[in-house]
Image (cartoon, rainbow, N blue to C red):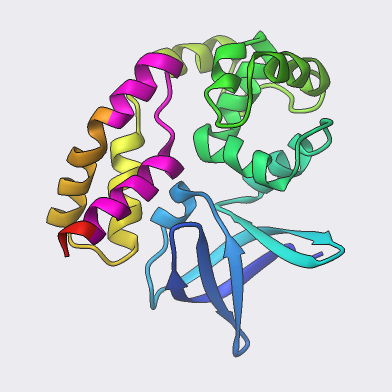
Amino acid sequence: MIAFVSGQVAALAPTTAVIQVGGVGMAVQCTPATLARLRIGEDARLATSLVVREDSLTLYGFADDDERQVFELLQTASGVGPRLAQAMLGTHSPDTLRLAVSTGDEKTLTAVPGIGKRGAQKLLLELKDKLGAPLGGSLVGAQRAAATRPAPWTEQLSAALIGLGYAGREADEAVSAVTPQAEAALAETGTAPVPQLLRAALQTLNRTR
């Protein structure tokens, strides 16, 4: 297994980073939050998980080993493949997922695109004894933090756009353009889906160029 890749960031796309390792460009699938931390030309280290299929080899990248571990644990639940596991981490942090599972919070899981009410109930049962308690402190402390922490979608989206090479002004305009879509999602599910918002923001930017 490839545990991590380390090297210069050669290219960035909405869902992929290319890391130059020993003269070879490694394409790594990442969440918007992970991509937002990367800059072309700078060195980066990503924890990785290699998913092997009959017709493909796909490398998934994460900000740290904890995200990678949760990604792999999520796939032990029936019906959860790498794409859904990555979508879960693209929507929520590892500790938010741990908190949701430990408290039986269906709403948090149904905020992930592709997970409905019945699917959330099934995941809560299957993952109950696998993810463990939040690492950021006691369960009560994690609950308080989750209740008081502001929604980070604007920061994540802006950072992802800047990481893709757009100017700060362009990123701000794109965030403003997709704000109605984000607010509608927040009202319906309680979470703004950053991957979908990033695609919508990129479409807005392409139309204005």
* Camera-side residue of 129 and 186: 186
Q: Is residue 195 magenta?
A: yes
In the image, what residue occupies the spot 63% across and 69% down?
A: 5
> What are the residue bounds of the magenta stretch?
181-206
Q: Is residue 14 left or right of residue 60?
A: left
- Expressed as whole percent of the image width and height from the top left, the position of residue 177 reads 20, 40
* Camera-side residue of 159 and 79: 79
- Expressed as whole percent of the image width and height from the top left, the position of residue 41 reads 39, 78
- Expressed as whole percent of the image width and height from the top left, the position of residue 137 reads 57, 22
- Expressed as whole percent of the image width and height from the top left, the position of residue 16 reads 52, 63
Q: Is residue 160 magenta?
A: no
Where on the picture, by quarter, is residue 45? bottom right
Where on the picture, by quarter, is residue 120? top right
Query: Which quarter of the rendering shows the C terminus?
Result: bottom left
Q: Is residue 104 left or right of residue 192?
A: right
Q: Is residue 64 left or right of residue 57?
A: left
In the image, what residue occupies the spot 35% across and 35% down?
A: 153
Can residue 52 be spotted in the picture?
A: yes
Please identify the residue farthest to the front as the structure is shown.
207
Can residue 148 be spotted in the picture?
A: no
Q: Is residue 130 above or below residue 168?
A: above
In the image, what residue occupies the spot 45% across and 49% down?
A: 32
